[in-house]
């Protein structure tokens, strides 16, 4: 199946707006690595795709870590000496340092300032701060806002709880013909940050929706997890299941106006690395391929040496390198409909390679077969060979049972789509036969989920 | 044996003119993939070298193809309303679309035009067209010629036959000490086209003449075949014999003023690929090495996956990229004596590498031997080491039974000639001994031809 | 142990002057490949480090060579017709062609000139010439000096002897925990040449002094040998011992103001090649890595195919490429204290890599361990990860028992020092364990010296 054509057929236009609208609905929710915020978010995703929610109790050991306390927050504010809510959680949830312990106190500005965070270099932006692993409280506000605070006594209130509870993540499993899996993972723990958070889970949600009623080679597993601890928790609970993961992608920062970046898996030349590099080379947008490094998003965990999964990370701008990163400026004006749709399209292109990448055997390996009498050669006698005929010659020449279609695409320089179409046309003409995979793909019925 | 020196000894000067003159004699013949034209051409080649002519009947199945009907033509013309032969096959055989079916008719210009081919962008040139696999007829003429045609009734005549007959090719086999073969192949089917056709068969003919009385390591097989169908026919009739082909070259477009292009075999790093690249790097002319692709000349067939022979393609300008390609401007002014001779020299250089490439073992592997007392070190005490001494040090250092002389030439950056001379001098001094080839070369007597 | 820190601790400042001063003391001695000059030089080295002197008799066969006669010289001069010593060995030993046979004669200038060598392009410099393997005599002088010689009869005297004796070399062995050895070799045969000769043996001497009281992984063998024949002699007498040499460096021309050059061993990607390349990439000075070639210094012998030892050559300017090479201008103004100390520091850096390069196994291979609670993660929550934390993540990620610390340094781009410190910190935290070397290192007690 040509997944890209299928995407065009099903979602011809307005796809970007649909994606952006979905992100819009999730934007105000105060997410964190645990608590009601992430559960509300997962519920919204569950309205679009079949999603299983998993609750793991506080204190559960997960490899070298343990599941933290659950954090919930109802309200928070700083009241000025005049009694005005000068910093108000209801207006923007970034105002509270994520995972802040509860506080209700009156204190002079001088004392309060030790709990305030601003960005002097961007005086109108509010920074994003967390204190997951050290119990503390604080507020984030714009630098100009802080400069305007008069001296005096301030009422400070954070109506939060940090207590025994659960870590919650969402899992969407789409069975394919084989039990071998493709993993798509994104973090769902960031509050009102649009690129670093919402963009990834939005694209993942619509990718799952798109795939959900197709007849697919691979099974697909989508994870919506709190960053780091969520991936670790899932891996700890599913250690054996990871053996079925053949390819994977972490999606993050995929909605901004920047060009694409694909960070390779630790393996470095896994099929996902080659497929992503190939699709980005031909996608028509600027794209850069980055070597693996052990710092980043949840590919850190999937690519830890004990797992060493073939999981790369697809981004537009790289986290930490754009000025809006981890500030209130990472909002839904920074993330654009067209970029979200473009990323979805690239993801579908990558999966199209994985789904259709096979080895074939040329059934006529001695000399070229006579394509002309089968209507597969140049119809006109022009001097320049058409790209479809060229692709057929490449497929015939390299289909010796060793080269995959992706190998042929890479060596010929032609986009995978042309090579796959050539293989299809040649197969239909009886000139090519698929070769059984050396690794017998297990069928879903053998394993279940 | 130093083949290049041998060439200089035997053909000191005027070689280019001799080559060009030979091409001149063949230029007017109306060749095609079958028929009297190619047989006349092969007869002329047979006057210079021992050539076996093979006739294969129309309809003989050759892999996925079958041998086509034989085409012969005696005359063709277009007569103007005034009765003048305005397009005349006797003046230039390109005027008739090659493989045209017979026709004799009177028709108005408007109807005739559907059968006329011109090159508007080169209004004085006549294009070259064929219709091998679809029965049709047509004329080629210059664009200006066509514009000058007055309205009216034209007499059109093509006195050709397309009927049962034979496909004919020529084969020249030169036995060497080993039955392992070097294949040299060129197409002999193009009519009055000098670079794309005559240049290759001219260089091949004189290369065979040069080799014919030398004591050679390899056996050489020269094929003069109609393009595509000729190579396929030969391969179909000689499938088992291809196992003896260790190296091969297709020669085409080797007489124009452009720099060299060598297109690698499908294997990509076969000895012929490395030898050709090495010789071209040191040949003193511009040269470019191209990766294999399955579109081109008869290397398409030799490199089909069932054969996968180590056959590359040597060109000057690449077919299809020079404006004269497949037009009447690809004539004997475009092809020059000096370029033909230069190509012959490069071919001889490549064969010199193949003939002399061996592994040696340094009989004094611990520390350097004292070259000085053998007269093999610097005679003067200058600071810069002479290139011959440098070559000896490289040969001694890398002659561990693993590295071939070509390996040493590549790693040292020295031309093969210097490395081969160094190996000879060191062998004579008793410092080096040849290593038996891991693949025992079969002797000619075991196989015959 | 961090060898570079240790060097800073032991020799905080003034190291360059100490090295330069040592060279100063050796400068006037008339060294040659045999004789009192080299013995005096070795005696001076023996005052700084434990040095065994080995005397090998003239005529002893060493592989393809034999030990030459011993050359000694007491005085030499050319007296002008006026009786003045116009060329005087006592002023500069380069004035006599090294290995000159004795002569005492009176001859006209015209006859004398056949024995005079000058450098017309540097008219104030005296060239350096030898005649080791052909018995002859001669004088070197500045071109201006020669032009000033009046016609007339000259008294010529070389009070030398060339007779049965010994070739002498020095060897300093420093046992480490393993009997596996690192070889450091330099030539000690050049007379008053500072960069080509003294710089290497000076750095080698102080490197041995620095290492002599440290607890080291490897055993170290320092060779101070006459060039070519000395290395050949040592190898002939120690053929079996070479199997214990795991890494080696030839030091030459290491005191001039040029940037570094490291010429790789014949193996090309031996650990010494990678360690030297890595350290030079991070050393803060210009540095170039050169491919192996069989011409140069004693790496020619160590890398001959029978030995093929992992021995590279560390230089600043490459011999033969700087104008002062083999002239009186290669003196102690050309060689600078700072450059000598910088080379010593680079050598120590390279040995630090060899000493500390190991494989580790991450004891927590599934997901990242929680570095934060061990005080090994970012203390502040800044956006940019500190280089020490980054190094820890790399070490954890790649410590799968396959990758060495040098592999990790190369792949991460971080300097080895950071990677080694990270491995140490992680080991202390119980997160990492060293992996036994696949090649069991023999202990010194098994072999002795």
Image: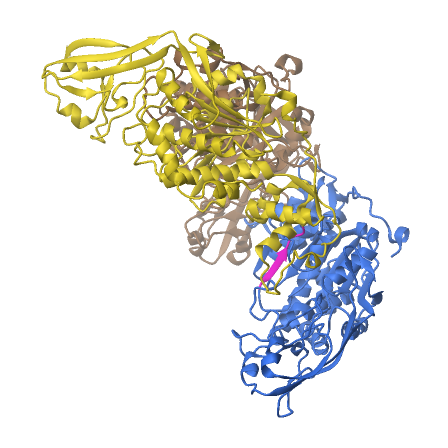
Chain colours: A blue, B brown, C yellow
Q: Position of residue C185 (x, y in %)?
A: 47, 26
| Residue for point 48% across, 40% down | C10
Does residue B213 appear in the picture of this structure?
Answer: yes
Q: Nearer the viewer, residue B8 or A355?
A: A355
Q: Nearer the viewer, residue A338 or B57?
A: A338
Q: Quadrant of the N terminus of chain C?
A: top right
Left or right, residue A369 beside residue B282: right
Left or right, residue C180 beside residue B327: right
**Would residue A427 be counted in the magenta stretch?**
no
Left or right, residue C351 beside residue B374: right
Q: Quadrant of the C terminus of chain C?
A: top right
Residue interval drawn in magenta: A259-266
Query: Image quadrant of residue A316?
Result: bottom right
Does residue B192 appear in the picture of this structure?
Answer: no
Count of numbered marks: 0
Vertical arrangement, residue A144 with respect to residue B94, above or below: below
Query: Image quadrant of residue B434?
Result: top right
Q: Position of residue B303 (x, y in %)?
A: 63, 35
Left or right, residue C437 beside residue A289: right
Vertical arrangement, residue B259 with respect to residue C158, above or below: below
Q: Position of residue A3 (x, y in %)?
A: 73, 60
Q: Position of residue A118 (x, y in %)?
A: 58, 75
Vertical arrangement, residue A422 with respect to residue A90, above or below: above
Q: Nearer the viewer, residue A195 or B44?
A: A195
Vertical arrangement, residue B37 with respect to residue A348, above or below: above
């Amino acid at each position: 199946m040509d997944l890209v054509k299928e995407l065009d057929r099903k979602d011809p236009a307005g796809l970007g707006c649909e994606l952006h609208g979905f992100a819009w609905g999730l934007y105000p929710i105060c997410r964190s690595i645990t608590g009601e915020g992430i559960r509300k978010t997962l519920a919204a995703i569950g309205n679009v795709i079949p999603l299983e929610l998993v609750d793991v109790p506080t204190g559960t050991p997960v490899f070298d870590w343990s599941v933290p306390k659950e954090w919930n927050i109802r309200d928070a504010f700083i009241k000025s000496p005049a009694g005005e809510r000068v910093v108000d959680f209801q207006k923007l949830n970034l105002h509270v340092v994520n995972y802040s312990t509860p506080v209700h106190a009156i204190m002079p500005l001088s004392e309060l300032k030790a709990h305030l965070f601003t960005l002097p270099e961007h005086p109108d932006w509010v920074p994003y701060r967390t204190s997951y692993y050290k119990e503390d409280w604080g507020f984030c506000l714009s630098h100009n806002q802080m400069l305007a605070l008069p001296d005096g006594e301030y009422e400070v209130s954070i109506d939060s709880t940090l207590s025994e509870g659960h870590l919650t993540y969402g899992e969407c499993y789409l069975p394919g013909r084989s039990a071998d899996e493709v993993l798509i993972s994104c973090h769902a723990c960031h509050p009102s940050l649009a690129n670093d958070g919402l963009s990834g889970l939005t694209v993942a949600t619509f990718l799952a929706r798109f795939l959900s009623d197709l007849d697919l080679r691979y099974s697909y597993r989508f994870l919506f997890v709190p960053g780091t601890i969520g991936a670790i928790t899932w891996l700890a609970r599913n250690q054996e299941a990871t053996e079925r993961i053949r390819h994977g992608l972490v999606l993050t920062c995929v909605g901004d106006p920047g060009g694409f970046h694909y960070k390779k898996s630790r393996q470095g030349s896994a099929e996902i690395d080659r497929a992503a590099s190939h699709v980005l080379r031909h996608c028509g947008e600027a794209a850069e391929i980055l070597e693996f490094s052990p710092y980043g998003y949840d590919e850190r965990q999937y690519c830890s040496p004990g797992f060493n999964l073939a999981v790369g990370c697809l981004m537009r701008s790289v986290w930490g390198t754009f000025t809006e990163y981890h500030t209130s400026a990472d909002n839904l004006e920074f993330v654009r409909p067209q970029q979200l749709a473009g990323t979805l399209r690239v993801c579908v292109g990558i999966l199209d390679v994985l789904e259709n990448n096979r080895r074939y055997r040329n059934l006529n390996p001695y000399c070229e077969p006579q394509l002309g009498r089968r209507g597969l050669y140049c119809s006109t006698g022009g001097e320049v060979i058409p790209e479809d005929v060229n692709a057929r010659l490449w497929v015939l020449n390299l289909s010796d049972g060793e080269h995959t279609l992706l190998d042929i695409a890479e060596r010929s320089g032609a986009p995978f789509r042309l090579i796959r179409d050539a293989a299809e046309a040649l197969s239909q003409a009886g000139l090519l036969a698929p070769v059984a995979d050396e690794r017998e793909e297990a069928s879903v019925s053998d394993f279940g989920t």
